[in-house]
Amino acid sequence: MTEPSELPERSRPVVEALRAAGVLGEVRVLPDSARTAAAAAQALGCEVGAIANSLVFLCDGAPLLVMTSGRHKVDTALLAQRLGRGRIERATPDAVRAATGQAIGGVAPTGHPAPVETVVDESLAQYETLWAAAGHPHTVFPLTYAELLSVTRGTPAAVN
């Protein structure tokens, strides 16, 4: 088991949040960056669709984290309509870091300085094991769809 002290600094709050939520998956440190779903899937030997991408948007002036399958693109207009919200636009790297404490390419579904409203792509439910970033581009962890919904307190929705 990788001890939190052996992980990158940005991954430590993620481990704490996962343990507090009862998520048992261990954070793994990958030798190469897994900034994209394709790179993560290749490193882990899984389908790209089983990668739970963490994408941060701004919606009505507030951050919105969308956990989507690595095989999907988020249709922001459709998602805004489904959520009954105004325009959804991609957050800048600075806005991502301000909302999550993490950099693009390593954003985890949890471990943020404050709760971030989250939407979870319903298509992720088809995979027994999902993989998500753990706060750093070289760290990932496994979890189930139910655990992802629980740890994020996310709203399930079709995102494309």
Image: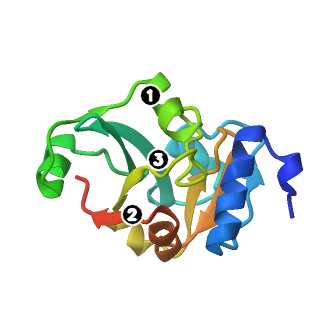
| 43 or 150, nearer to the observer | 150
* Mark seen at residue 95: 1
Label 2, secondary structure: give it. loop
Question: Residue at coordinates 53% horizontally, 40% vertically from top-left?
Answer: 100
User: Sequence order check: which comes first, mark 3 or mark 2?
Assistant: 3
User: Sequence order check: which comes first, mark 2 or mark 1?
Assistant: 1
- Residue at the disc numbered 2: 154
Question: Residue at coordinates 32% horizontally, 64% vertically from top-left?
Answer: 155
- How far is disc 2 from disc 1 in space, using C-alphas? 20 Å
Tell me which amino acid carries mark 2.
Gly
> Nearer the observer, disc 3 or disc 2?
2
User: What is the x, y in percent for residue 5?
Assistant: 88, 49
- How far is disc 3 from disc 1 in space, using C-alphas? 14 Å
User: What is the x, y in percent for residue 118?
Assistant: 38, 55
| Residue 131: quarter of image | bottom right
- Residue at the disc numbered 3: 54
Classed neighbour count for the residue bearing mark 3: other residues with Cα under 10 Å, few (<14), some (14–19), many (≥20): many
- In this picture, residue 61 sits left or right of residue 98: left
Tell me which amino acid carries mark 1.
Ala
| 50 or 16, nearer to the observer | 16
Tell me which amino acid carries mark 3.
Ser
> Nearer the observer, disc 3 or disc 1?
1
User: Sequence order check: which comes first, mark 3 or mark 1?
Assistant: 3
